[in-house]
Image (cartoon, rainbow, N blue to C red):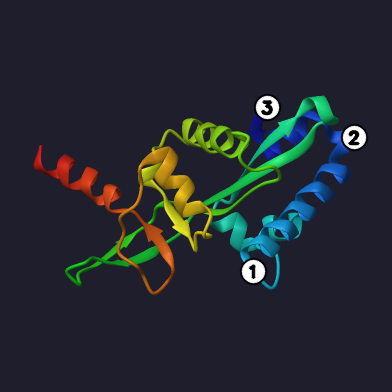
Amino acid sequence: MRYCTLDELLATLPSDRARLEAQLDRLGEKSAEAQGLRQPITSMALLQSPKSLDEGHHVHVLVDDQHDGAIVGYLKTGTKHLYYVTAAGAYKEMDPVCVLDFYVVQQRQGHGAMLFRSMLERLHVAAKDLAYDRPSPKLGPFLAKHFQLRSFVPQSNRFVIFDAFFEAQESNNRQ
């Protein structure tokens, strides 16, 4: 298994561009189906939209080089301007890097953890430093198991920012 960004993958395999783009589109459809969404939130067309470009959307992929370079999972990230309401009712504005979509073909084989950890390393962030857009019922237990992230204040925008995000900021402010 090999980690890279979708842009890097397409640049190294230009002759396979159509096949790889079709794979990503199919995986985006499977992700939408798994999350009970009416339509995909990840596709090549959406990645080329002005909104995706403005928000710096990037797709991180896990590739199986032993199976014709098939994409076996992806994780889409981007920056969003969010309004957050604390447990005390105070409002905060922030622009965190967000996990916008995450899908792995075969679960429980370590592929998701490998992809997620590789993305964190690439972006030089910790899982607690990210916001999560409408996390699926499977993402919550994944984050709890691998990164001990459990506690958060529910938001009307359905983004999840874990309490650990703010605990680290408060600790830095006290120093």
Label 2 SS: helix
Mark drawn on residue 36 = 1
The three-letter amino acid code for the residue at tag 1 is Gly
Check the picture and name the quadrant holding the N terminus: top right
- Foreground residue among 95 and 102: 102
Residue 121: x and y in percent read 48, 30
- Foreground residue among 140 and 131: 140
| Circle 2 or circle 1, nearest the eye | 1
In the picture, measured across the screen, residue 141 lies left or right of residue 171, that is: right
Mark 2 — residue? Answer: 15
**Residue at figure coordinates x 82%, y 31% from the top left:** 13
| Disc 2 packing (10 Å; few <14; some 14–19; many ≥20) | few
| Circle 3 or circle 1, nearest the eye | 1
First along the sequence among labels 2 and 1: 2
- Foreground residue among 58 and 73: 73
**Residue at figure coordinates x 84%, y 34% from the top left:** 14
Mark 3 — residue? Answer: 2
The three-letter amino acid code for the residue at tag 3 is Arg
In the picture, measured across the screen, residue 144 lies left or right of residue 142, that is: left
First along the sequence among labels 2 and 3: 3
Check the picture and name the quadrant holding the C terminus: top left
Distance from label 3 to label 1 (Cα)?
Answer: 29 Å
Distance from label 2 to label 1 (Cα)?
Answer: 34 Å
Taking 113 as reference, is 29 above or below it?
below
Residue 77: x and y in percent read 54, 49
The three-letter amino acid code for the residue at tag 2 is Ser
Q: Which quadrant would residue 50 be assigned to in this image?
A: bottom right
